[in-house]
Image: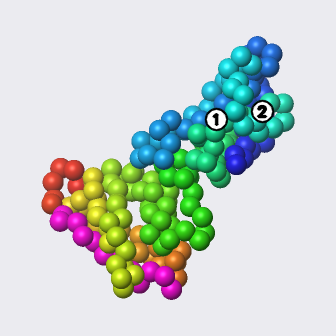
């Protein structure tokens, strides 16, 4: 479910040495399955452990996960990186905003999952997002751009060289391409 690098485990052990005996860590998702999902890590004292918590054993401590957060933490990774600028604990949870779908799920569910877990996080850096409206009978994914992508002069490049290329690679023989249904209006919100 969650992988924690050796450097992150060592970091947690160092932090837990200063906590009361029996303290572990809790990994959680607030607003799981929504665009506003947020992942976090906190201390979990022994008296805060719930009977239904899932215990993931690591060297020197357990990571506790509540059942509601568990499916959204599938494939999550925690790492501790030290570089010239300092140190940073990172938590990547690709399924926090949308639960991972099965390989045999419908095409629209699998495409929606890729958009929410891979495409939109990269567009968010520009204040943009894309919504899957439908998949047509001739297998085109119809998308609508929002935020900084609406009216952006680079939207055609993002659509064809970014999103379409990625989706056709992931769904060969299933998708014929992508089309933009957005009525673009240039404004202060547009990224480029």
Residue plotted at (52% across, 82% down): 172
Mark 2: secondary structure: strand
Which quadrant holds residue 19?
Answer: top right
Foreground pick, 14 / 77: 77
Q: Residue at x 65, y 52 (%)?
A: 75
- Left or right: residue 44 compared with residue 57: left
Q: Is residue 144 above or below residue 65?
A: below
Residue placed farthest to the top in the image? Answer: 20
- The count of marks equals 2
- Residues 81 and 100: in front is 100
Question: Which residue in the rendered view is the most extreme toward the right?
Answer: 59
Q: Is residue 85 magenta?
A: no
154 on left or right of 104:
left
What residue span does the magenta drawing correspond to? Answer: 173-184
User: What residue is pinned by disc 1?
Assistant: 66
Checking the image for residue 62, the label placed there is: 2
Q: Measuring from the top left, give residue 104's x and y in whole percent.
A: 59, 71
Observer-nearest residue: 1 or 155? 1
Nearer to us of marks 2 and 1 is 1
Q: Is residue 174 visible?
A: yes
Circle 1 residues within 10 Å: few <14, some 14–19, many ≥20: some
Residue that extends furthest to the front in the rendered view of this protein: 51
Residue 100 percent coordinates (x, y): 57, 57
Residue at (34%, 60%) from the top-left corner? 130
Residue 181 in magenta stretch: yes
Displayed quadrant of residue 29: top right
Dominant secondary-structure state across the stretch colored magenta? loop
**Position of residue 48 in the picture relative to residue 174 (left or right):** right
């Amino acid at each position: 479910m969650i992988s924690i690098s050796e450097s992150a485990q060592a970091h947690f052990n160092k932090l837990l040495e200063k906590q009361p005996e029996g303290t572990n860590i809790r990994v959680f998702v607030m607003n799981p399955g929504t665009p506003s999902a947020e992942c976090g890590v906190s201390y979990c004292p022994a008296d805060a452990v719930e009977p239904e918590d899932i215990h993931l054993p690591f060297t020197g401590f357990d990571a506790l996960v509540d059942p509601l957060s568990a499916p959204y933490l599938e494939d999550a990774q925690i790492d501790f990186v030290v570089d010239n600028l300092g140190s940073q604990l990172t938590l990547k949870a690709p399924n926090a905003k949308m639960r991972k779908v099965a390989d045999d799920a419908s095409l629209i569910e699998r495409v929606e999952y890729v958009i929410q877990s891979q495409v939109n996080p990269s567009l968010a850096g520009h204040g943009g997002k894309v919504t899957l409206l439908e998949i047509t009978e001739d297998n085109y994914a119809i998308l609508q751009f929002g935020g900084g992508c609406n009216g952006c002069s680079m939207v055609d490049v993002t659509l064809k060289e970014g999103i379409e290329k990625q989706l056709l690679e992931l769904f060969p023989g299933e998708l014929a391409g992508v089309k933009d249904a957005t009525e673009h209006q240039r404004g202060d919100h547009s990224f480029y």
